[in-house]
Amino acid sequence: MTRTSSPAPRAVSEVGAPRLLGEHVGVDLAKHVATFGAMPAQHRVKRGHAGPLVAEIEHSGLAGRGGGWFPTGRKMHAVVTAARTSRKDPVVVVNAMEGEPAASKDSVLVHRNPHLVLDGAVLAAQAVGSSVAYVVSHRGGRSIGTLERAVEQRNARGGDPVELRVLAAPARYVSSEESALAQFVGEGIALPVTVPPRVFESGVRRRPTLLSNAETFAHLALIARRGSGWFREVGDPSGPGTMLVSVSGAVASPGVIEVPTGTTMRQILGLAGGTTGAVSAAVTGGYGGAWVSAGAAIDLPFTVAGLRDAGGTPGAGVLVVLPTDACGLVETANVVRWMAGQGAGQCGPCRFGLAAVAQDFAMLSNGKLKGTGLAGLERRLGIIPGRGACRHPDGAVRFAASALQVFGDEVQRHLSGHCSAGRRTFVLPVPSEKVTLPVERPGEEWR
Amino acid sequence: MSGHIVTIDRIACDGFGTCAQLLPERVILDEWGYPLIDPTPVQGSERQHAKRAVNACPRLALRLEKAPHDAPAVRPTARR
């Protein structure tokens, strides 16, 4: 998988001190305790009850850093309520998959401070009454080894009040979708399932499941130590704290940067060493996110509400800047082709629809699409969203549709067979494709 | 206003198209043969009709579900 190399993360005094990435502690538990303090003692609550930490997290305003930006405290409450009504003990799952090719923040976080993530998993598990927390990452990724060594260190020092288990899941984009991850932990099959029920009420082995992104658990571990008031001291009041942003493309030093939420794109790019020349647009949120025009978005806060007007989204903190010598349509065609192959192949509108959209985009990028073809592409983009079991098709379509909006002038040029870009290499990373066969499902051959 | 809505299990659906034949007033097929469903509640006599389509689905993917009070349970199919 292509990744931007990740040098030491930066957060300069201009935007405040980093919280998660300031120290590189690694797997050394003693050093972790010396740096961040011991994990606060907590009792595991009885089934259907919420520990005091749940209210603290709710007050903190912590929102999910995996891209959904859903209030974590509310999610924890929902899990507790589901445990009470279903009379099943909940399960905690940490999503450290990072399937997003342009993202590297979770692997950087795990590499630098794995115990923050693990502390968060243990604390959250106790607070919702779970006896086990699973940490899932990509098979073959470097995070797996780091997490395993970190858990060994903890076990050597007496272990945790909650069982921590590290699991390696297949490196397919859609594997990190929440219902796919829950099914993977329970049954070993990393494929999305039909919702509802959502995982908070019926996830791993039909238990209520608290599933959140690795960064979210790391913030939770610090809130448990320092309190909700401390957490709210920085960042945008509607979703406070700091956030990790994976910045790449036309910047002088690409990598992961920690900034308070609400920091503008201009400031973030400044922290990444500034742009390396004229830029036209940027990918926000990842390949299920959206293009924004650089001019429209540069001074907007990099938040859900801030980017909305420009059609963007922070997603899981992804920002890729496009230099003016690159063609947004050519880049999009490459990404959409890859995204079409990254689905689970379970739902027709996604399986066939994304393939058709990818083909349309390939023709558009080659200057072979005509006006009627463009109308067909737009019609397809209109009917695919909302018609998969998961949101994979919605994200891919949003990305593709945003390209038509942001690169409207370039679309006209391509329709007449021209492209204004001089660049011959791709800016947006796309992993080299191993064989992505549609997944065999039981009963499929019967037809 | 409560009522029932036609929903579909997208994973189970294999695009047989039976629903579009039996319930054309609510279901049309896209260019790949998969159903596009009217998300509004099913009214009165239409309900029997919808039930027949649900029972005839070869993949048991079509459902008639109680509509939630506020919003339709299915996400809107058009977004632009």
Image (spheres, rainbow, N blue to C red):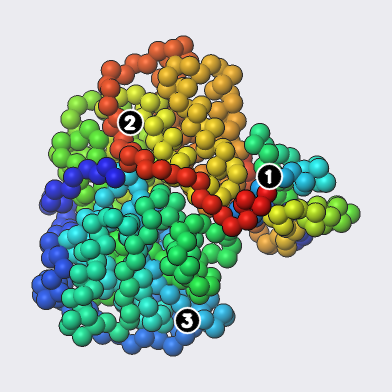
Residue underneath mark 3: A89
Q: Secondary structure at mark 3?
A: loop
Would residue A171 be found to the left or right of residue A230 on screen? right
- Give the residue displayed 13% in from the left and 71% down from the top: A28
Looking at the picture, tell me which residue is in the foreground, A430 or B39: A430
Q: How many numbered marks have been drawn onto this rendered protein structure?
A: 3
Q: As drawn, which residue projects farthest toward the right?
A: B45
Q: Secondary structure at mark 2?
A: strand
Q: Chain of mark 3?
A: A
Residue underneath mark 2: A281
Locate residue A358, reporting x and y percent. 48, 32
Q: CA distance from mark 2 to mark 1?
A: 39 Å
Q: Amino acid at mark 2?
A: Ala
Location of residue A436 with respect to A33 vertically, above or below: above
Q: Amino acid at mark 1?
A: Gly
Q: Chain of mark 1?
A: B
Q: Amino acid at mark 3?
A: Asp
Residue underneath mark 1: B15
Badge 2 and badge 3 both on one subunit: yes
Q: Chain of mark 2?
A: A
Q: As drawn, which residue projects farthest toward the front?
A: A445
- Give the residue displayed 47% in from the left and 85% down from the top: A47
- Give the residue displayed 30% in from the left and 24% down from the top: A326
Quarter of the rendering containing residue A51: bottom left
Q: CA distance from mark 2 to mark 3?
A: 47 Å
